[in-house]
Image: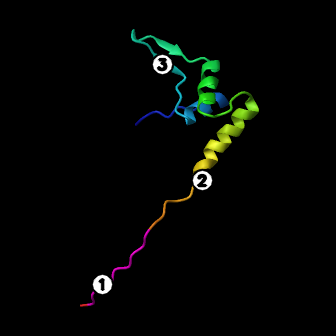
Amino acid sequence: MPQIRVAKDSLSKLTQLYGIGTSYYDFRGERHKVSRDSRVAILAAMGVDASSEEAIEKAVHAFETSSWMRMLPPALIIIVPVPLG
């Protein structure tokens, strides 16, 4: 069963929601952490304000509620008569 990682701080939670990693492995197999400034810049490039703790909390809330606010795709319901007998 895959492990679920829980973010320790609000910026980590926001980057996790947007699929931005907090670290990476280079060609030698060495692990490097992605700096806070880099993660904020990546989010900004995606149109997400992470310039302050308040902005981060708002962005997390907006991301988490956006899926609930989305309309369902249109559906077509067809009733097919079933012969009796």
Q: Which residues are magenta?
A: 76-84
Residue 39 x %, y %: 60, 23
**Residue in the foreground of this view, choosing between 46 and 19:** 46
Corner quadrant of residue 36: top right
Which amino acid lies under the numbered mark 1 shown in the image of this protein?
Val
Numbered badge on residue 24: 3
Is 77 placed above or below 73 here?
below
**In this picture, residue 17 sits left or right of residue 80:** right
- Which residue, given by chain and number where applicable, does mark 1 sit on? 82
Residue at 63 percent of width and 48 percent of height? 65
Residue 84 x %, y %: 27, 90
Which quadrant, please, contains the N terminus?
top left
Residue 54 x %, y %: 76, 33
**In this picture, residue 29 sits left or right of residue 9:** left
- Which residue, given by chain and number where applicable, does mark 2 sit on? 68
Query: Disc 3 versus disc 2: distance between alpha carbons?
Result: 32 Å
Which amino acid lies under the numbered mark 3 shown in the image of this protein?
Tyr
